[in-house]
Amino acid sequence: MTESIYRPSGEGQAVDIGPSKWLIKAASSETAGACDVFEGRVGHLEGPPLHVHKEQMDMFYVVSGRLKVQVGDKILDLGPGDFAGAPAGVPHTYANVEVEPAHVINMMAPGGFSDGLIEVGTWPPGPPPEGEELEAFAKKYRLEIVGPPIPVVLGLVGGPA
């Protein structure tokens, strides 16, 4: 990497995941694989299922709003200025259980998930794919789905039938 990276406010590659809006501020291809940096507006009851990144630390910094972050067995309630990180190999997830969107900076080190975020943005609205399609995605991005999203755990929405 010989070039600096500059993304003004509101700029970056846009990825929509349901009502959640994400910008890729720095992709692993731009950081020589060191990290990915994403800026997101996480919508009400949005967030991924409990998962494990086999090689990456997943970190969350809340700019505004509130975000529930599960790391291992702990469910943390993050507000503006709060930070939480899940080391590689530790189950984690996040969700916005408030009505207003949560403005979040998500960093992953080493990088390698920016293409995965783009791929998730191509999925049709609704629940994520299941079965072989989800298994192929998980294998490709070196992660494992190990449980439901936080809104299901907290009984705010129904779980799988």
Image (cartoon, helix red, strand yellow):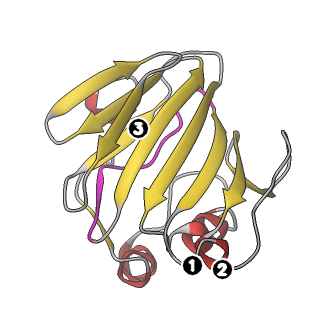
Answer whether residue 138 is magenta in the image.
Answer: no
Q: Residue at x 53, y 16 (%)?
A: 80
Point out which mark residue 48 bears. Answer: none
**Distance between the Cα atoms at labels 3 and 1?**
27 Å
Looking at the picture, which amino acid does disc 3 mark? Answer: Tyr
Mark 1: few, some, or many residues within 10 Å (few <14, many ≥20)?
few
Q: Is residue 157 above or below residue 100?
A: below
* Quarter of image, res 93: top left
Q: Residue at x 43, y 84 (%)?
A: 140
Q: Earlier in the sequence, mark 3 or mark 1?
A: 1
Report the side of 14 relative to 42 (left or right): right
Local secondary structure at mark 2 = loop
Point out which mark residue 32 bears. Answer: 1
Q: Which residues are magenta?
A: 43-54
**Distance between the Cα atoms at labels 2 and 1?**
6 Å
Looking at the picture, which amino acid does disc 1 mark? Answer: Ala
Local secondary structure at mark 3 = strand
Report the side of 107 relative to 74 (left or right): right
Residue 60, how many percent across, how many down?
45, 39
Q: Quadrant of the N terminus?
A: bottom right
